[in-house]
Image (cartoon, grey):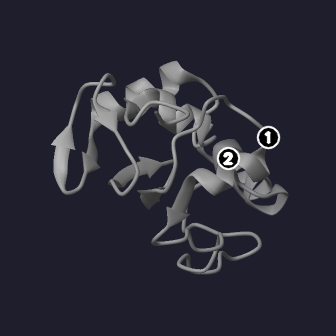
Amino acid sequence: MTGGPEKLRIDKWLWHARFFKTRSLAAKVVASGLRVNGTSVAKPAFAVGPGDVLTFAQGRDVRVIRVVALGERRGPAPEAQTLYEDLDPPRPRGADEAPMAATPRYEGGGRPTKRDRRALDKQRDVLE
């Protein structure tokens, strides 16, 4: 006899592996669209086991994970990292994004500067 079950609910496994803070968040992600071995799954009660490949959205990233082991509990992060193998590690923030200007200026948009406000006040005085 083995020490634990051969399969585990997908929402519970995602929670054990610390991808989501609560099981209800994990269940929402499963319901919104998650793939197990290329097949779309919409039920949080779907059972996963070692060797299954999961593809799901986490924040702005798409994660591709291989289940290595099933957890018995939601333990500390180093223990949770032994439950999976990351097939496509997320890129560091800002690697894909273009650098933004420090203070963007828009032609005629946004809040006017003090100089622009004085010019507007002069135009209003002339019109009245």
- Identify the residue at horizontal 44%, vertical 30% (top origin): 5
The x, y position of residue 82, in whole percent, is: 65, 55
Q: Is residue 92 left or right of residue 46?
A: right
Q: Nearer the viewer, residue 46 or 96?
A: 46
Q: Is residue 50 visible?
A: yes
The x, y position of residue 97, in whole percent, is: 55, 76
Q: CA distance from mark 1 to mark 2?
A: 6 Å
> Tag on residue 76?
1
Does the residue at mark 1 contact the one at mark 2 (Cβ under 8 Å)?
A: yes
Q: Is residue 60 left or right of residue 103?
A: left
Is the residue marked by circle 1 packed among few (<14), some (14-19), or many (20+) residues within 10 Å? few
Q: Nearer the viewer, residue 9 or 110?
A: 9
Whether residue 65 is situated above or below residue 128 in the rendered picture: below
Q: Nearer the viewer, residue 7 or 90?
A: 7
Whether residue 53 is situated above or below residue 80 in the rendered picture: below
**What kind of element bears circle 1?**
loop
**Residue type beneath disc 1:** Pro
Is the residue marked by circle 2 packed among few (<14), some (14-19), or many (20+) residues within 10 Å? many
- Identify the residue at horizontal 33%, vertical 54% (top origin): 52
Image quadrant in which the C terminus is located:
top right
- Identify the residue at horizontal 66%, vertical 54% (top origin): 81
Q: Which residue is mark 2?
A: 80
Q: Is residue 114 left or right of residue 46?
A: right
